Amino acid sequence: MGKIWLISFLIIAVLASGCTYGPKTETQPAAPNTVEIKGFAFNPDTITIAKGTTVTWTNQDSVQHTVTGIGNDIDSPILSPGQTYSFTFNDTGTFEYQCHIHPTMKGKVIVT
């Protein structure tokens, strides 16, 4: 009977130690005033900033995208994977944009 308890204890100890082994990974929060382009989406799709703030978009997707304003001056070149585009918002209001290549991708910057 004692051997069964000892074997059971050792099995549980081995299984429990396996649950805690491995590198610790942490998700870093996105930098303020940044938008990731990933998975054919702008993330976050809406950002609120103060007047005079610069927003930076980073293409983390595997294909090219743009950041193209809808009725405003936002107009990036075609961004290949890894490239960034920055725009400074000097006026208050709501600024909508999309990807010119994939027009279903939409985002919004609210400037206060």
Image: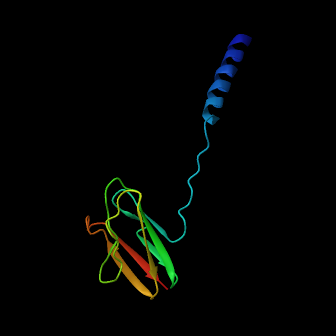
Asked if one can make out residue 1 in the rendered structure from this viewpoint, the answer is no
- Horizontally, residue 26 falls left or right of residue 54, namely right
Could you tell me residue 28's position as x and y percent? 57, 56
Asked if one can make out residue 71 in the rendered structure from this viewpoint, the answer is yes
Where is residue 79, by image quadrant? Answer: bottom left
Could you tell me residue 82's position as x and y percent? 41, 57
- Above or below — where is 18 with respect to 71? above
| Residue at 71% from the left image edge and 16% from the top image edge | 6
Where is residue 19, by image quadrant? Answer: top right
| Residue at 49% from the left image edge and 77% from the top image edge | 54
Q: Between residues 94 and 54, which one lies in front from this camera angle?
A: 54
Could you tell me residue 100's position as x and y percent? 26, 69
| Residue at 42% from the left image edge and 87% from the top image edge | 93
- Above or below — where is 112 with respect to 75? below
| Residue at 67% from the left image edge and 15% from the top image edge | 7
- Horizontally, residue 49 falls left or right of residue 61, namely right
Could you tell me residue 44's position as x and y percent? 44, 67
Check the picture and name the quadrant holding the N terminus. Answer: top right
Q: Between residues 87 and 104, which one lies in front from this camera angle?
A: 87
How many marks on residues? 0
- Horizontally, residue 7 falls left or right of residue 102, namely right
